[in-house]
Amino acid sequence: MTGSLRLIGLTGGIGSGKSTVARLIAERGIPVIDADQLAREVSVPGSPALVDIAAAWPHAIDADGRLNRRKLGATVFADAAARARLEAIMHPRIAALANKRAADLAHAGHRLAFYEASLLVETGRYRDLDGLVLVDAATPSRIARVVARDGATPSEVGARIAAQLPLSAKRQVATHIIENDGDLAALRVRVDGLLDLIGSQDNRP
């Protein structure tokens, strides 16, 4: 995607284990660009993105001028128009910063990196990448993980899953699929196998 760097997307629905896979990849010494972290960086106090968010949803800004992500999330979760407006504010800025990070990695001599993001398929961003890894898991496994992690009720998690693009749709465009219905040891084996398959051993600065 950027010079000699292969940038591969990493995505999955809530509770699928995407972030765990990202951590396992990073443990192998392969850079992972985290879209959630980029979102935080582009929405710091004083940033153009936060100015736009404050104009649209002033209640989502705390007294210290920082974004209250929980309040903003509650606002846009059930409102498709609000969600589209937020995405129009955030996604171009996140994409630009991701491209810069990828260029920096290429300049440093890396030949492989991953871009972890939840909405790669929904935004069409996956088409700009050199492959797409989907982390998938059965719905009961996903619900159990999020209940344990967030303290949400199963019905709340089910509603969040239902609001997302089905993983079955993402499977149709994924170039690699990691099934994550087992334990961490099993997942590590699958991740190692994937990295060997795509030639991670060549990723040396």
Image (spheres, rainbow, N blue to C red):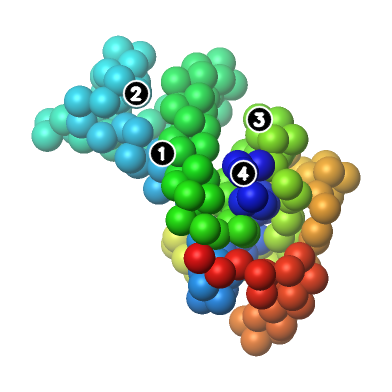
Label located before the other in sequence (1 or 3): 1
Q: Amino acid at mark 3?
A: Thr
Q: Residue 33, position in %: x, y?
A: 50, 52
Give amino acid for label 2. Answer: Ala
Where does label 3 land, which residue?
123
View extreme (top): residue: 55
Q: CA distance from mark 2 to mark 1?
A: 9 Å
The disc, 2 or 4, on the residue closer to the chain's N-terminal end is: 4
Q: Residue placed at 41% from the left, 39% from the top?
A: 39
| Res 125 quadrant in image | top right
Q: Quadrant of the N terminus?
A: top right
Mark 4 and mark 1 lie on one chain; the one further toward the N terminus is 4
| Mark 3 or 4, closer to the camera | 4
Q: Which mark is residue 39?
A: 1
* Position of residue 152 in the picture relative to residue 176 (left or right): left
Percent position (x, y) of residue 108? 46, 56
Question: Which numbered circle lies on residue 49?
Answer: 2
Q: Total number of numbered labels?
A: 4
- What residue type is disc 4 on? Gly
Q: Are marks 1 and 3 in contact (CB under 8 Å)?
A: no
Q: Position of residue 155 (x, y in %)?
A: 61, 51
Say whether marks 2 and 1 touch (CB < 8 Å).
no
SS under mark 2? helix
State whether residue 146 appears in this view.
no
Rounded to the nearest angstrom, the CA distance separating label 1 from label 3 is 15 Å
- What's the distance in space between the residues labelled 3 and 4, CA to CA? 23 Å
Q: Which residue in the protein does label 4 denote?
A: 3
The residue lying at 80 percent from left, 61 percent from top is 177
Nearer to us: label 2 or label 4: 4
Mark 2 / mark 1, whichever is N-terminal: 1
Q: Against 87, is 111 above or below?
A: below
